[in-house]
Amino acid sequence: MKPYTLSWGNHSLVLGGRTLIMGVLNITPDSFSDGGKFEKFTDAIAHARQMIADGADLIDIGGESTRPFSDPIPAAEEINRTAPIIREIVRETDIPISIDTTKAAVAEAALTAGACIINDISALRGDPKMAPLAADAGVPIILMHMQGTPKIMQQSPSYQDVTGEVINFLQSASGIAEKQGISSSKIFVDPGIGFGKTAAHNLTLIKNLFRFRSLGLPVVIGTSRKAFIRKTITGHPEKDLPPDMPAVITGTQATIAAAILGGANIVRVHDVAEAVITARITDAIKNAHD
């Protein structure tokens, strides 16, 4: 992908040049990696400031856990968790903020608070009002592949050709988005690592990420601290590790490097400082002259 600038409202992103770093801020008690750490307003703001200082290009804020077997929460609760944080962050910085939600009401409240990107893990399937909202607002939207829902997605996920099926889904989802008025220039795609996939499926998708270039859309990927990394480290499907231990953070960097070499434009991460270094070195290798 040749570098180009995507501009909307008061924001812009240069895509296709260096890899952009999206820092994760979960305002939840039960997210798999950092649940409960940033529930307090002051803790959440401090973490956002630190990620920005560490070099994040975007911040992705979520108020509902989407870890395997999690239950949804009411939109009002999700709004109460996220909107005040967004309002405070945009007072301090012009860094683009995305809202990680499947609910149009939450996305609308977040956009009103100052967010400017919608990250929809349901790829518009969760709420029929989401596509019209995104189209009317003229904001970028990230469409992710997920087999099932967070509650059931890890109950025996199965594919004949995981890469081909995920690409076909995202091609269809982006087409549906365009038909509902969302500009193709504002559509991002995400293969949904860990969302209705086994460890083997996740590894295959990362290996074959270059095939997603056929979609002609910017690729966002989130591998950070996920179970397939932890279980690959232990070498046993039943042996897990704490998501924030150093070995898992190191393992995450390997997946980020592989994803960048495969063509990822944005990497969604918990550990921004480490990811910035990984991306800088991997980008240099990727762009080195023959």
Image (cartoon, rainbow, N blue to C red):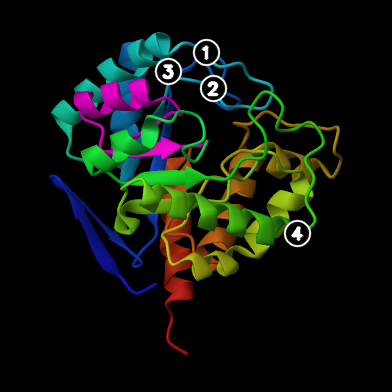
Name the spot of residue 104 as percent of width and height, x first. 37, 26
Q: Is residue 280 magenta?
A: no
Mark 1 or mark 4, earlier in chain? 1
Is residue 222 in sight in this rendering?
Answer: yes
The vertical placement of 27 against 211, above or below, is above
Inter-mark Cα distance, 3 to 2: 13 Å
Asked if the residue at tag 4 contacts the one at tag 1, i.e. Cβ–Cβ closer than 8 Å, the answer is no
Q: Which residue is mark 4?
A: 161
For marks 3 and 4, give the one nearer the viewer. 4
Residue drawn at x 67%, y 34% is 148
Mark 2 or mark 1, earlier in chain? 1
For marks 3 and 2, give the one nearer the viewer. 2
Q: Which residue is mark 3?
A: 38
- Kindly state the secondary structure of the residue where label 1 is placed: loop
The vertical placement of 228 against 2, above or below, is above
- Kindly state the secondary structure of the residue where label 3 is placed: loop
Residue stretch rendered in magenta on the structure = 97-121
What is the three-letter code of the residue carrying label 1? Pro
What is the three-letter code of the residue carrying label 2? Ser
Inter-mark Cα distance, 1 to 3: 8 Å
Q: Which residue is mark 1?
A: 29
Mark 3 or mark 2, earlier in chain? 3
Inter-mark Cα distance, 1 to 4: 35 Å
The vertical placement of 66 against 228, above or below, is above
Q: Which residue is mark 2?
A: 65
Callout 1 crowding tier (Cα within 10 Å): few <14, some 14–19, many ≥20? some
Mark 4 or mark 2, earlier in chain? 2
Is residue 40 in sight in this rendering?
Answer: no
The vertical placement of 18 against 53, above or below, is below
Name the spot of residue 19 as percent of width and height, x first. 39, 59
Mark 3 or mark 4, earlier in chain? 3
What is the three-letter code of the residue carrying label 3? Phe
